[in-house]
Amino acid sequence: MGNFASYELLHNETHAEDDEYSFDLVLKKLSSVPGLKVDRRPPTREQMKKALVIRYGGIGDAMIATPVLRALKEEGYHVTFNTSDNGREIAKHNPNVDELIYQAMDEVPNADLEAYWKGLSKGYDRVVNLSGTIEEALLSIKGRNPEYDLTDDERRAKFGNVNYYNHALKIAGIDRRGMNGEIFFSDEEEGIARIWRESLDGRFVVIWALGGSGPHKRFPYAAMAMAEFARVNPEVLFITVGGHAEKLLELAADDNPNYMHRSGRWGIRNTAIAVKYADLVIGPETGVLNMAGCFDTPKICMLSHSSWANLCKYWKNDHSVQSRQTCSPCHKMIFSIKECPVNEKFKVSACAAEFDPSDILPRMKEVFRKWRRNNSTPIALPGLAQTTEPALVGSPRDRGSLIH
């Protein structure tokens, strides 16, 4: 190359292990004139320390990995993120991710993952594998973790005060604590979102996540709570979000001016930026609430298998509430309704049904009053009387010292 061009070395790797006999060489041509020296160029990938972060799974899993990405970038690493569909969406436009290795679900069988990770890790100065750092490590799995068979109190004593974001940083060997997740948007996304939000001027916009990845993440009284709040506060616009399954829970008529149904229609990034520009976000401990934790947007997370300290400790404008069910938080991974006490009326985990509108509505009203003070004159409907607010119950900070 030096005989006929000037170039920059981007990548040079030789593979001579086992039955591999190959090399990978990537050069960037700078000029057709050989021998030129380019000064003050930023360090190339080859010249930088290289870090690999591995994390598959749900939206929340990817969000919990983002402080690790930032910390490694700030330490001067070229950061590669090996992730799946949800992580790819979360990582878009993230300045702390230099390179992304996308992996489709089950592309590598579970039995082959250890060998795959060993090969993938070659050439990196630092490898952070976050697989199993929340599930299994802090949320026990039946048949795989001995802690699953402990009593609820024993599990709370062991896991109740371990913050998920801090734990990921600790696993990565990073001496920082108190960081939240991050998600970044393009200028185009921000511009469209501002226009959308401006078009809703005068509305109190509430994003309500109707469900999540298990039977402990479906609040059966959501429609009742929304209807009662809209009856008294006509300025509200509830935007319901979730997957295709949650479309069945969108009970209000499509032409009801207090509702905008988006379950199964909005993708991750649509929902994420709407969360940023909303006035309140409500839902179970699922990816939508993890995304809300990135922003100052007020949020109410209905905690079931995790404690407030686990998930919400560093969130701003947090009004989260713990389930009244005696086994909550259980610190278990719940895959099936058979693994939980069941609410027979709704066929959901008992903890999901042990929130009451009286747990949620006062918190909604508190956020609404603050919003109202900063906005225009309320819309008045004749014949409506304010009711006395019930006492707050089920606060995650009032469920025993083990989960403070």
Image (cartoon, helix red, strand yellow):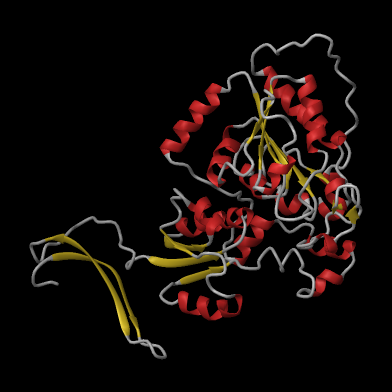
Horizontally, residue 363 falls left or right of residue 399, namely left
Q: Is residue 225 above or below residue 340?
A: above
Q: Position of residue 41 (x, y in %)?
A: 25, 56
Q: Position of residue 68 (x, y in %)?
A: 55, 58
Horizontally, residue 360 falls left or right of residue 33, namely right
Quadrant containing the N terminus is bottom left
Q: Confirm whether residue 121 shows in the render.
A: no
Q: Residue at position x 71%, y 29% from top? A: 253
Quarter of the rendering containing residue 234: top right
Q: Nearer the viewer, residue 139 or 164?
A: 139
Q: Position of residue 209 (x, y in %)?
A: 69, 42
Q: Confirm whether residue 317 shows in the render.
A: yes
Q: Nearer the viewer, residue 260 or 324?
A: 260
Q: Residue at position x 53%, y 57% from top? A: 85
Quarter of the rendering containing residue 6: bottom left
Q: Residue at position x 55%, y 45% from top? A: 267
Horizontally, residue 97 falls left or right of residue 302, namely left
Horizontally, residue 171 falls left or right of residue 156, namely left
Q: Position of residue 37 (x, y in %)?
A: 14, 62
Q: Residue furthest top?
A: 382
Q: Is residue 15 above or below residue 51?
A: below
Q: Nearer the viewer, residue 297 or 110?
A: 110
Quarter of the rendering containing residue 236: top right
Number of numbered labels in the structure image? 0
